[in-house]
Amino acid sequence: MDDIDLIKLAMEAKNNAHAVYSNYNVGAALLTKEGKVFTGCNIECSSYGISLCAERVALVKAVSEGYTEFTKIAVVGGHLDECTYTTPCGACRQFLSDFNNCDMDVIMGYKENEELISKTFKLKELLPENFEL
Ligand code: THU
């Protein structure tokens, strides 16, 4: 699974975003070490604080199906149909870091003049000194 294919799956998931309060739609696609993909979108709630981010939705889907090791996650987001540079929030970085000890590629997909481009970081770059029990 190459990065662009993973970004495209994240874009499909973004179409299901339930972001009725912020109108900021996010999609994520998480690749397991076995090569299986789990997608997620943000799901907002009338009790705002319990809304779910796309990355954590993808992660809990994977973990609840027995997959706990990941090699990459692609993230896309933006207001409504836009696809602008969107990075995982701090809570999602920590949640992801509990798996694979931060050795995971985080791929941000976004559009510039209709061209799909991406920027990739290791999770450990985005969350140095992550908390560990
Ligand atoms: N959001 C995500 O889904 N992932 C992130 O990493 C950042 C924020 C969502 C939460 C909320 O539904 C909307 O984006 C605006 O904050």
Image: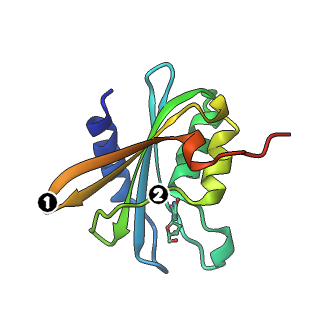
Instruction: Tell me which corner region of the image, top left, top right, bottom left or bottom right, holds residue 91.
Output: bottom right
Give x and y (percent) for residue 35.
43, 22
| Spot occupied by residue 29 in the image (x, y as percentages of width and height) | 43, 42
User: Mark 2 vs mark 1: which is more N-terminal?
Assistant: 2
User: What residue is drawn where x is 59% and y is 61%?
Assistant: 52
Residue 37 visible in the displayed image: yes
Residue 4 pos. (x, y %): 27, 38
> Residue 99: image x %, image y %?
66, 34
Left or right for 132, reference 14: right
Q: Which residue is mark 2?
A: 87
Name the image quarter holding the N terminus: top left
Q: Quadrant of residue 76?
A: bottom left
Q: Quadrant of the C terminus?
A: top right
User: How packed is label 2: few (under 14 Cα within 10 Å), some, or many (20 or more)?
Assistant: some
**Residue at the extreme top:** 34
Colouring: rainbow
Above or below, 122 against 89 in this view is above
Q: Is mark 2 within 8 Å of ligand 1?
A: yes
Question: Residue at label 1?
Answer: 114
Q: Secondary structure at mark 1?
A: loop
Q: Residue at x 64, y 27 (%)?
A: 66
Residue 86 figure quarter: bottom left
Q: Is residue 13 found left or right of 126 in the rendered image?
A: left
Tell me if residue 30 can be seen: no
Q: Is residue 117 above or below residue 19?
A: above
Q: Which mark is residue 101?
A: none
Mark 1 lies within 8 Å of ligand 1 (Cβ measured): no
